[in-house]
Amino acid sequence: MTVKNQYFMKDKKAQIYLKMHRGTDDDGFPRGEKYYPISSAPVWCYTRQLSQQNVTYSYLRGVSETRMFVFNHYGNVEVYDLIRYNGNWYRITRTDTQDDYNSDLFVYVENAVGGYLPKDSEIQPYTPGIWENR
């Protein structure tokens, strides 16, 4: 839920990791998921916990959103990508832009728990241009 003409002061830093399948095995199945950061360092963002009302609405839709992030526009950020913020992992449940313009990107997340937490072997180093080849 975005508010028109509201400025979101981006005073925090978080890292977005894109979920990608790199190659296939001998049978043609994807090898495994790898997570690539979109930049060499965390990016500036605005973030806040969702109100209890918004948490309840998301729960009624079948997801358990807990937090919202606002980033400058980044292409190719999709559902199931991950965000690392303040030592915690979050799984993206939906993304939104305001009026379909290349302005702020609103990202709603749930806590990444259990099988959604990436293993150390799945986290890859920053590779310039990787997200354009998604």
Image (cartoon, rainbow, N blue to C red):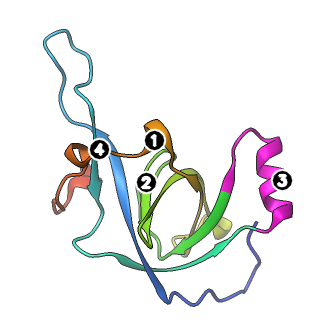
Q: Magenta residues?
A: 51-65
Q: Which residue is mark 1?
A: 116
Mark 2 or mark 4: which comes first in sequence?
2
Residue 20 lies, with reference to residue 5, above or below; the image says: above
Q: CA distance from mark 2 to mark 1?
A: 9 Å
Question: Hey, which residue is sitting farthest left in the picture?
Answer: 26
Q: Which is nearer the eye, 62 or 107?
A: 62
The numbered mark, 3 or 1, whose residue comes first in the sequence reads: 3
Mark 3 to mark 1: distance in Å? 22 Å
Q: Amino acid at mark 1?
A: Tyr
- For the residues labelled 3 and 4, the Cα–Cα distance comes to 30 Å
Foreground label between 2 and 1? 1
Q: Which residue is mark 3?
A: 56
- Please tell me which residue is depicted at 47% across the width and 76% down the height of the picture: 72
Quick check: 73 above or below 36?
below
Q: Circle 2 sits in a helix, a strand or a loop, which is it?
A: strand
In space, the residues marked 2 and 4 are separated at their CA atoms by 12 Å
Front in this rendered view, residue 51 or 76: 51
Mark seen at residue 119: 4
Q: Quadrant of the N terminus?
A: bottom right
Residue drawn at point x = 65 percent, y = 89 percent: 7
Secondary structure character of the magenta stretch overall? helix
